[in-house]
Image (tube, rainbow, N blue to C red):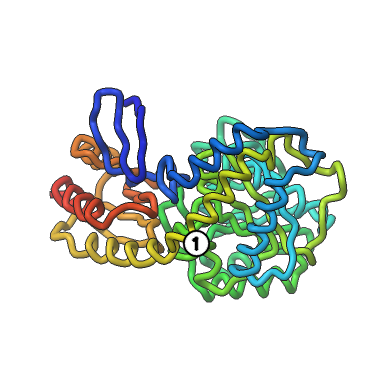
Amino acid sequence: MALVLAKGARLWDSEGNEYIDCAGAQGWANVGHSHPVVTAAIQAQAETYVAGQESSYNDQRALWMRDMAEVFENSLGWSGCHIHPSNSGTEAIEAALKFARLSTGRTGIVATMRGFHGRTMGALSLTWNKNYRTPFEPLIPGITHVPYDNIEAMTEAVSDDTAAVIVEIVQGEGGVHPGSTEYFQSLRELCGARGALLIVDEIQTGVGRTGRWLACEHHALSPDVVALGKSIGGGLPMGVTAWRTEAGQFQSGTHGSTFGGSPLVCAASRAVIEVMAEEKLAERADTLGLWLREQLQALPTKQIREVRGLGLMIGVELRGKVTPVLQQLMERGVWALPAGLNVLRLLPPLVIEQSDLEQVVEMIGQVLE
């Protein structure tokens, strides 16, 4: 299908068919498609200054960094931070890897089974799924994978050569699995004791998706490094790597990005931050997500094994394969995602109306029956 139009939480294809978007364009459309505030910011900036060279300051990047620093202070308690803008989530992960190795002088990285962190060579090395990895091996050395939400396995894996541990607060591609507060707090203590950086991948969970600005807030977790992407650019390509001041810094010329922090994308991202606050979208995701999980759990079908998630990041584990379900939902006007072979993943824009979600629940019920 060729999609040709998107507004809010609705999609239209080239044949004029309309869909409720429960995929959020692979999770980036948190503030919805073509939000008028974001669109106006892009249009105004496009007439002024689109992109320059990274080594030159620009007003939009300065204002954006101020806004982002406030987000990290409010969400994580960071009193100061360094911020590197790039063009995607996977680039944000690459910068985090380089920073971890540079600042610690170590080479080892511990990641988790079922984790997904991107498809460039460094990020792919952290990603667990062999279908993504195998065609490109050998990948970068020094990567260890351990079971998720298992502090005993992590304790065994983190050594004096470990530069960083990287985790997701909710594993998205891996099946929408939330971790526990006990796990994350223990992981924070472990990394601190052994001198390893704690990197949290908030590329899919950030920007209000789980009912908090950053999913770390659910566990009062303050990591050393955070990676953002997807929704932070409001539909334009953007990645963000941020780390607390105490963790160190890149020396000039150590890392860079031609288009990272361009005035156009920074203006769009500032508009996203504005919309998130004015429309209270994180709070909305929290309320609607709880309601939606309850509705899905109440469906009178034996085809659902489990419903899990946080906010409007929801996984419905089925007793059969998810692909036929996705195809039938599409025929009924609902656009959704898989998360593995048997998990239906819902990532609707946070602006979606409850009436739309009521239709989605009804359609899921019909298909599973």
Asked which quadrant contains residue 108, the reply is: bottom right
Residue 259 against residue 176 in the figure, above or below: above
Q: Where is residue 142 in the image (x, y as percent from the top left)?
A: 72, 49
Count of numbered badges drawn on the protein: 1
Q: What residue type is labelled 1?
A: Ala
Label 1: how many Cα within 10 Å (few below 14, some 14–19, many 20+):
few
Q: Position of residue 265 (x, y in %)?
A: 61, 40
Outermost residue toward the right in this view: 252
Residue 191 visible (yes or no)? yes
Helix, strand or loop at label 1? It is helix
Q: Position of residue 269 (x, y in %)?
A: 57, 48
Residue at image x 68%, y 59%? 225
Q: In the rendered view, does 338 fall on the left or right side of 267?
A: left
Q: In the rendered view, does 279 fall on the left or right side of 80?
A: left
Residue toward you, 1 or 5: 5
Q: In which quarter of the image is the N terminus?
A: top left
Asked which quadrant contains residue 224, the reply is: bottom right
Q: Position of residue 323 (x, y in %)?
A: 29, 39
Residue at image x 43%, y 40%? 34
Residue 124 visible (yes or no)? no
Residue at image x 19%, y 64%? 298
Residue toward you, 123 or 92: 92
Residue at which label 1 appears: 277
